[in-house]
Image (spheres, rainbow, N blue to C red):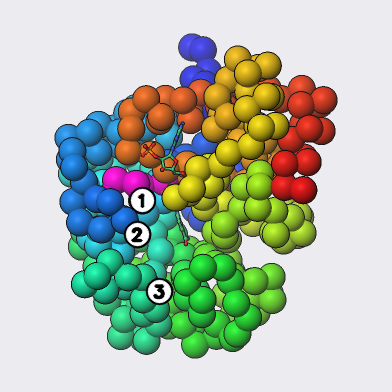
Amino acid sequence: MDMTSIDKTGTFPLGSRTVKRLGYGAMQLAGPGVFGPPKDRGAALAVLREAVASGVDHIDTSDFYGPHITNQIIREALAPYPDDLTIVTKIGARRGEDAAWLPAFSAEALTQAVHDNLRNLGLDVLDVVNLRIMFKTEGPAEGSIEEPLTVLAELQRQGLVRHIGLSNVTAAQVAQARTITPIACVQNMYNIAHRQDDALIDDLARDGIAYVPFFPLGGFTPLQSSTLSAVASRLDATPMQVALAWLLRRSPNILLIPGTSSLAHLRDNLAAAELELPDDALALLDDVAA
Ligand SMILES: NC(=O)c1ccc[n+]([C@@H]2O[C@H](COP(=O)([O-])OP(=O)(O)OC[C@H]3O[C@@H](n4cnc5c(N)ncnc54)[C@H](OP(=O)(O)O)[C@@H]3O)[C@@H](O)[C@H]2O)c1
């Protein structure tokens, strides 16, 4: 049988499994502002089902998307889950009634969040749980993460969580965490235009730890760059496909979770697995951040 397109990206260890490097991020499946139900629930179910039918075996989510709604849609679309599907969720935040993103780091809040994820996803144990640090909402900020991480490690010891990851963290926090418990993955903002984590990615690659960039396409303000557009038109691809192909080339430990609520965009994003970037295009793209 022919390899499906996304197999071309290769694999990398994530928690108990080895996953394909092109996955799917579910945040866009909630309503506007990641709050409330989607306009078209049927379309959200279809995106998830097509992602998995196309070979995606890694989905990123959180119970605070919606809240609750994104996980409920994942469960409706995909349960009983395929054996090879890794669902990664995150805890550490809650939503205000006005849709605000608020820190939720007490032992009680973290425990509640793990149980919310279990219930809404319909699971007995969560594959990977990222502790999402909220010292600042936007971007990492220094400070000890020992207390909340110790709570999550205890939930792991109780058998509710298989593997622990970190999100929105500094390199110092990753180092601190690794003295407390093994870390399966780090999820920070990173893309072709935002490369603050270049050194961290290389360090994690050396240690066999996955790096999962959020906002790989720029997030709420999708990437725009004349270089990206020029390279895309030369390669008969879209700028978003070039941005994803660049991340796949950047480091073997990078796992992609582009988010979309659209079947057409899902297909475009998965097709990025087929895109090979010539060295001269790569040289141009490396300048986008500058
Ligand atoms: N740890 C954290 O703090 C954190 C923060 C944010 C996100 N995340 C995770 O990371 C995942 C990815 O981030 P994200 O979804 O926010 O941002 P993203 O993947 O960078 O971009 C998503 C945006 O790009 C659009 N888009 C997607 N594919 C496209 C395509 N092929 N052509 C044109 N536009 C396209 C989407 O709109 P359409 O729906 O119209 O396609 C959406 O507006 C999320 O799903 C979530 O799981 C984690």
Relative horizontal placement of residue 130, taking residue 286 as reference (left or right): left
Q: Is mark 2 within 8 Å of ligand 1?
A: yes
Nearer-the-camera pick, 56 or 180: 56
Q: What kind of element bears circle 1? A: helix
Badge 1 amino acid:
Met
Q: What kind of element bears circle 3? A: loop
Position in image of residue 17 (x %, y %): 50, 47
Residue under label 1 = 27
* Total numbered labels placed on residues in the image: 3
Q: Is mark 1 within 8 Å of ligand 1?
A: yes
Question: Label 2 near label 1: C-beta < 8 Å?
Answer: yes
Relative horizontal placement of residue 227, taking residue 27 as reference (left or right): right
Q: Residue at x 42, y 25 (%)?
A: 267
Q: Looking at the image, is mark 1 or mark 2 nearer the viewer?
A: 1
Quadrant in the picture for residue 201 = bottom right
Real-space Cα separation, disc 1 to disc 2, in angstroms? 8 Å
**What number is the disc on residue 154?**
none
- Does the stretch in magenta take in 113? no
Residue under label 3 = 92
